[in-house]
Image: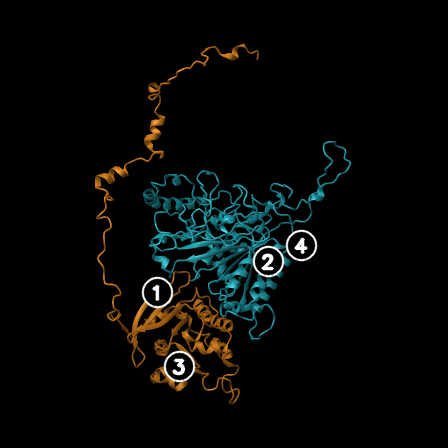
Chain colours: A orange, B cyan
């Protein structure tokens, strides 16, 4: 599952909630891309660096480049040492740093950034980050920059959520039942139909992913007992069914105004019907049966 | 209104009545000389612009939208000087197709193009345009599809025998190369066609400065720059008649993609009450002013499903001339509905302009669906018999939605008897109200040539209303 999430490139949006947290999935993705040998940049805003690095072994930790916004977000301590300019500058700096080679940027979290930056600016910066300068059609997907963003669904209204979803190439919504987490993944490949997938998984302590099977739905009681269906045509006084013979006769019936082949032939067939037609005329007292043509004596 | 036939309405003013003592004794009215400015629409000298034709109904100069079926629905084409707004579908799969058809039609007809986008580089957009189809290959495509559909439709149409005789919507390929072409989506446009065409691109991330400064101006800076760009192009290239030395008049086709999305710097999709909520409406207003005074036509795609404030959508609709909405079935429950299994989505014609006219130019058919075949994008009227479920999707309750009060007026077209005076008077100065899908189970003919007066049994609206 992790490979498919990372394969598409662009913005990968992880939507989590209080019950089903997504930071462990984010860390699993970070670990996966670090193991593939890519550059990984992490912009940490919500948790401290030690907490983020916890659980990774030293090889992965050495590949992680951590940009810390948690400790001093407003740059009160020595200016120039921490990231100047706030979160926006930090994002733009990331854009410049990842211009060479495939890289992964993990944003932990997008919710924090949404609270500190106006939404259109954030969307524009994310688009610039995930786009890079190269044309996405030319370079193979492995060369692209992918941006993993963690978004807490409950903190935002439908507006920013919709805006970020429309930007994202892959959207993962975390949910689950009975202690088992599931991810509903929506892939939006360019110029293709979006595809859905639901995966049940669990994250192990060393941040590798284990797929699970879907838990059986025993706990949900059936709402209605299955009533035997009643056939309404059993006690009628008329017959609604057609036997096979009747159906054949019905299908072969020509409708009265349908201009079928037989009717066409009947019209085209010359002369046969004319012999059988008669005109019956009974003159009454006032009729003039003069056979002469009254126009004969006209002078024209 | 002076009856002027195909020559522009209103350009021949009543001042042409000159009671001069003339030598010939037939009439004392003298015809004024032809006007010098090129701003007439529909007069014979303007037909010489490639890719345009005058409308047979109101004399407007029309350009093709790239899809002949859509042209038919819009009354022949898109009028020069107007805006076509496409409301995007949820996953933005089909609206770029309409956008590309419009641009490809411009290239094939030799018009100038202006492509503006905040998401994709305009050069990339132009590379992905579909290739034009030559006539006989389109005929082969059509025949293949007709054969596969024939057997199914025969069974259904046995009782409704009359409707087999009605002509279908899709006109055959236009044999003359002047108006309306067909395109093959699976192929790219040949490179030499792009190189010989004249196009201008506006890509927002390049134009906008890198420093983030919150300017408190009324228009978002992205929109302001785009308007300036369009104005410059119109002025420099002479589309508004400002360079009279230019002999050959041409049309400028403007395409703006994803207007209103956050990538343009507009937060109308993010919040419900934003400070810059008038930015988009002002942009559309100014854009329409630019278009009306120049020989240009514009297509805009807008993600209206993301706009949080519904009042803004209504304002945007009023500020555009023609509005077409796309609704795709992906991800919705309609995807599995057997009624819709042949189609990929619905097309809603939300608004049609009333240009130089007293009545609207709407088609008979309101239930339209589209289908994306392997190579073509087709629009069809949804024909379904009244025996199956109504399109509201509720099989247990085949209730009929009562038509809204607006529909009696919309049923009026030029060939029926006169409408009620009150309804007519109220519509004199406004645009057409949004068309509602009544879904009353009528079997409808597509907007073909109006030959079958007996087939178009227009039931009086209100007959099918269930009593409250």
Instruction: Determine the CA span between mark 4 and mark 2.
Output: 21 Å
Check residue B288 in the rendering and tell me which mark sits there, or answer none.
Answer: 2
Which circle, 3 or 2, is nearer the viewer?
Answer: 2
Report the residue marked by disc 4.
B243
Q: Secondary structure at mark 4?
A: loop
Q: Secondary structure at mark 1?
A: strand
Whether label 3 touches label 1, CB < 8 Å: no
Horizontal and vertical percent position of residue A296? 52, 11
Same subunit, labels 3 and 1: the answer reads yes
Instruction: Determine the CA span between mark 3 and mark 2.
Output: 52 Å
Whether label 1 touches label 4, CB < 8 Å: no
Which circle, 1 or 4, is nearer the viewer?
Answer: 1
- The chain containing the residue under callout 1 comes to A
Horizontal and vertical percent position of residue B441? 39, 48
Q: Which residue: 38% across, 83% down?
A: A52
Report the residue marked by disc 1.
A196
Which circle, 3 or 1, is nearer the viewer?
Answer: 1
Whether label 3 touches label 2, CB < 8 Å: no
In the depicted structure, whether residue B271 falls above or below residue B134? below
- The chain containing the residue under callout 3 comes to A
Check residue A64 in the rendering and tell me which mark sits there, or answer none.
Answer: 3
Report the label total. 4
Same subunit, labels 1 and 4: the answer reads no
Same subunit, labels 4 and 3: the answer reads no
In the depicted structure, whether residue A278 falls above or below residue A184? above
Same subunit, labels 2 and 1: the answer reads no
Whether label 2 touches label 1, CB < 8 Å: no
- Near mark 4 (Cα within 10 A), the count class, few <14, some 14-19 or many ≥20, is few
Q: Secondary structure at mark 2?
A: helix
In the depicted structure, whether residue A100 falls above or below residue B113? below
């Amino acid at each position: 599952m992790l490979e498919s999430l990372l394969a598409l490139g662009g913005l990968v949006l992880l939507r989590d909630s209080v019950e089903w947290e997504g930071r462990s999935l984010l860390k699993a993705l970070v670990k996966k891309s670090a193991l593939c040998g890519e550059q990984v940049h992490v912009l940490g805003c919500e948790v401290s660096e030690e907490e983020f690095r916890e659980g990774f072994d030293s090889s992965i930790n050495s590949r992680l480049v951590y940009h810390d916004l948690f400790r001093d977000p407003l740059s009160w301590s020595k200016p120039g040492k921490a990231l100047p300019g706030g979160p926006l500058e930090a994002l733009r700096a990331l854009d410049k740093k990842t211009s060479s080679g495939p890289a992964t940027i993990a944003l932990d979290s997008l919710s924090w950034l949404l609270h500190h930056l106006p939404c259109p600016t954030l969307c524009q910066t994310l688009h610039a980050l995930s786009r890079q300068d190269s044309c996405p059609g030319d370079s193979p997907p492995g060369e692209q920059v992918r941006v993993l963003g963690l978004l807490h669904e409950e903190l935002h209204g439908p507006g920013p959520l919709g805006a970020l979803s429309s930007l994202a190439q892959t959207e993962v919504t975390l949910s689950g039942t009975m202690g088992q987490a599931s991810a509903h993944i929506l892939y939006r490949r360019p110029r293709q139909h979006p595809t859905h997938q639901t995966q049940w998984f669990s994250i192990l302590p060393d941040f590798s992913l284990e797929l699970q099977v879907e838990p059986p739905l025993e706990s949900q009681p059936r709402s209605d007992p299955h009533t035997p269906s009643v056939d309404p045509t059993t006690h009628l006084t008329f017959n609604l069914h057609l036997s096979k013979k009747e159906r054949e006769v019905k299908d072969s019936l020509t409708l009265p105004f349908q201009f079928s082949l037989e009717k066409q032939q009947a019209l085209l067939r010359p002369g046969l019907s004319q012999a059988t037609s008669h005109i019956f005329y009974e003159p009454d007292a006032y009729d003039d049966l003069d056979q002469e043509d009254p126009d004969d004596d006209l002078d024209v | 209104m002076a009856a002027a036939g195909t020559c522009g309405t209103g350009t021949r003013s009543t001042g042409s009545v000159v009671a001069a003592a003339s030598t010939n004794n037939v009439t004392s009215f003298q015809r004024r000389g032809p006007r010098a400015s090129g701003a007439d629409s529909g007069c014979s000298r303007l037909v010489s612009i490639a890719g345009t034709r005058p409308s047979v109904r109101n004399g407007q100069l029309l350009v093709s939208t790239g899809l002949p079926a859509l042209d038919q629905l819009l009354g022949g084409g898109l009028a020069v000087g107007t805006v076509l707004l496409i409301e995007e579908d949820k996953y933005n799969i089909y609206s770029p197709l309409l956008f590309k058809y419009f641009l490809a039609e411009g290239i094939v007809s030799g018009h100038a193009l202006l492509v503006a986008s905040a998401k994709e580089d305009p050069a990339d957009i132009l590379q992905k345009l579909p290739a034009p189809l030559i006539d006989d290959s389109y005929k082969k495509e059509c025949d293949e599809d007709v054969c596969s559909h024939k057997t199914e439709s025969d069974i259904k149409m046995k009782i409704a025998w009359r409707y087999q005789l009605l002509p279908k919507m899709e006109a055959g390929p236009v044999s003359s190369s002047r108006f309306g072409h067909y395109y093959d989506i699976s192929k790219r446009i040949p490179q030499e066609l792009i190189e010989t065409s004249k196009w201008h691109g506006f890509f927002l991330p390049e134009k906008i400065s890198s420093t983030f400064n919150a300017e408190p101006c009324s228009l978002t800076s992205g929109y302001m720059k785009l308007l300036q760009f369009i104005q410059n192009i119109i002025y420099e290239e002479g589309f508004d008649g400002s360079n009279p030395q230019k002999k050959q008049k041409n049309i400028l086709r403007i395409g703006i993609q994803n207007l209103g999305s956050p990538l343009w710097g507009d937060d109308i999709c993010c919040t419900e009450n934003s400070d810059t909520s008038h930015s988009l409406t002002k942009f559309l207003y100014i854009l329409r002013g630019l278009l009306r005074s120049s020989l240009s036509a514009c297509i805009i795609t807008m993600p209206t499903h993301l706009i949080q404030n519904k009042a803004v959508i209504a304002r945007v609709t009023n500020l555009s001339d023609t509005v077409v909405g796309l609704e795709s079935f992906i991800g919705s429950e309609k995807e599995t509905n057997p009624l819709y299994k042949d189609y990929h989505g619905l097309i809603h014609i939300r608004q049609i302009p009333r240009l130089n006219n007293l009545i609207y130019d709407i088609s008979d058919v309101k239930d339209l669906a589209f289908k994306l075949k392997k190579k073509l994008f087709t629009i069809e009227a949804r024909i379904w018999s009244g025996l199956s479920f109504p399109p509201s999707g509720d099989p247990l309750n085949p209730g009929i939605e009562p038509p809204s009060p607006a529909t009696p007026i919309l049923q009026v077209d030029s060939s029926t008897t006169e409408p009620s005076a009150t309804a007519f008077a109220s519509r004199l100065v406004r645009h057409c109200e949004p068309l509602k899908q009544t879904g009353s189970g009528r079997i409808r003919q597509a907007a073909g040539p109006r030959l079958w007066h007996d087939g178009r049994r227009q039931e009086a609206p209100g007959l099918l209303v269930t009593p409250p």
